[in-house]
Image (spheres, rainbow, N blue to C red):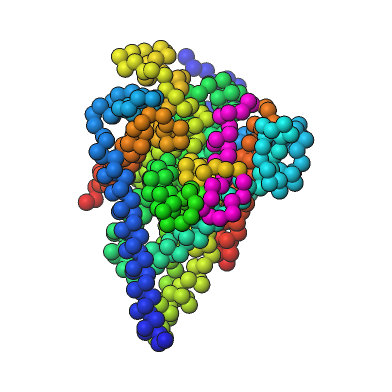
Amino acid sequence: MSAKIANKLATAVIITITSLMVLAVVGLLGFIIVRGLGHISFHFLTSAPETIKAGGGIGPQLFNSIFLLLLTLIITIPLGLGAGIYMSEYAKPGRFTDSIRLVVEVLSSFPSIVIGLFGLLVIVNLFGFGFSLFSGALALTVFNLPLMVRITEQSLRGVPREQKEASLALGLSRWKTITSVMLPIAMPTIVTGTILAAGRVFGEAAALLFTAGMSSPRLDFTDWNPLSPFSPLNPFRPAETLAVHIWKINSEGLAPDAAQIAAGASAVLLIMVLIFNFAARWFGRLLHRKFTATK
Amino acid sequence: MYRPAEGEQPLHQRLQKKHAKPHIMEEWVGKVYTTLCILVLVVTIVAIVYFVASRGLSTFLVNGVSLSGLLTGLKWDPEGDIPLFGALPFIFGSFSTSLLAALIAAPLGCCAAIFMTQIMPGFGRRVLQPVIELLAGIPSVVYGFVGLTVIVPLLRSTFPGQGIGIAAGALVLSVMILPTITTIATDALASLPFGLKEGSYALGATRWQTIYRIVIPTTLPSLLTGVVLGMSRAFGEALAVQMVIGNAPHIPHSLFESASTLTSAITLGMGNTVMGSAHNNALWSLALILLLMTFVFVFVVRFLERRNKR
């Protein structure tokens, strides 16, 4: 076989495989959304789930997912930003920095179920937070933190050196330089990365099985006192998220329409993640334009 | 009236020092704050390793199960009259699903990366990359659900058996790890040293000759890094696999028979056991195996990266 024919053949094969892959991905997304869309209604999104009857909704689960995400972000962002700043600005090359880099790498590749077990042992039992939103948020923090650190570090490294040096030359302290000069420049990348990471956290389930719990109390959406056990705002109540709900009804669902609920909930979850994705891109571009005055 | 005490610095110098103070304070606050954040990270990982290890080791230390019994035992019956803790079926399940998933996803991912960097860079980067990245965003339970409603019935109708099993698990996992492999392969191919490819073309080589004689051998360590990272993700994935693999604690005779993995055994067992019981400790030992495998994967990746830098 001549080289030219081999070249044409290989190119054709690669293009075919790649286009099949794109078709498969589009088909997958389409399948999930189309299959679930028929089941999504206002009632489905707002009502409570039923255990043995048909017609249950996902209202509390959806609320729990969003609330848990917010809690996680409140804990993760300051910690992740701080650690990321340390890694990119304060860490001196050496054995200590290398080992911290290894820590971040290992932490980000821990299986989420192991983090869930750790949460069960330490946060739920040892610290006595019980199965609660707060325990879940802490477990998700462990899950999310290495991502945040990496995002912050990379975006700070992307800041032009001249800009940093100019600020230092004006006599500003290093910390002031970081917070007032470098962070604004790095902000679009950090925000984009954070929203993308949030999308991942939103769909996480394995780490939550043993920390946030697999059940939700009957929530009273008229009770906004954060200390009442039935208030949706109480962070120390057990909470089942949307992803956990999908897993639960698929493996032990008793409702006759469990398959439809799973389809609908999957579609909702996927649509939320897609919204996160597009929001990240759009918001990143917007911030970039705002901070750098470019079009 | 201000009178300088003996041995004290003159006023103007003291004022200057006061002037410098907020600066130093600021710097100090920044340093302490970021160092504390790093400490949280380090403490977290030490705590995870310590607690998982202390629980996981008590199977051997408290319950007297031998290490080889756990690693090579074929029977998992922790609640039986004579409790048996053979975890080999789970270890086998985890390794076979993640290896198979990597075998399926690696060629696909490399194809996509070659397409994006060598064949149609503009179109590929604009259309294919976002599509692949979307795959990474799909939650794992949704993958499990799709596997349960599409892949399992498909396998059931085309092959003998129930459809659930290692093949279904590996297929679901291969889609999940595809973005990891593709992204890393694309980065590696895109950052190929300038001039290598041009040199090959200048000698009259065709594009395919350049790709498989020059591009792939040069970037092989990075491509392998992607595959290993993908495998490590597949190894630790819990719920998607648990939904489609069937969860029978034995080594299956075919790819389409019900099997089980380390993660699925933990997921299903942990809720039904009492903390501190032998069964519970054995599950922690499985978690310890997962943890150790994570370290192995990280070190393989590091090794490959070092090879790559040379």
Relative height, residue A230 to residue B152 (above, below): above
- Name the quadrant of the N terminus of chain A: bottom left
Q: Look at the magenta stretch and give its main secondary structure.
A: loop
Q: Is residue A144 visible?
A: yes
Q: Quadrant of residue B19?
A: top left
Relative height, residue B162 to residue A143 (above, below): below
Q: Residue at x 46, y 72 (%)?
A: B215
Q: Nearer the viewer, residue B112 or A137?
A: B112
Tell me if residue B254 is in the magenta stretch.
yes
**Is residue B293 toward the left or the right of residue B203 in the image?**
right
Residue B54 in the image: state x and y as whole percent: 69, 34
Relative height, residue B129 to residue B35 (above, below): below
Q: Residue at x 44, y 24 (%)?
A: A215
Q: Nearer the viewer, residue B248 or B287?
A: B248
Residue B200 in the image: state x and y as whole percent: 43, 81
Q: Residue at x 39, y 75 (%)?
A: A10
Q: Residue at x 34, y 32 (%)?
A: A257
Q: What's the magenta region?
A: B250-275
Residue B43 in the image: state x and y as whole percent: 60, 34
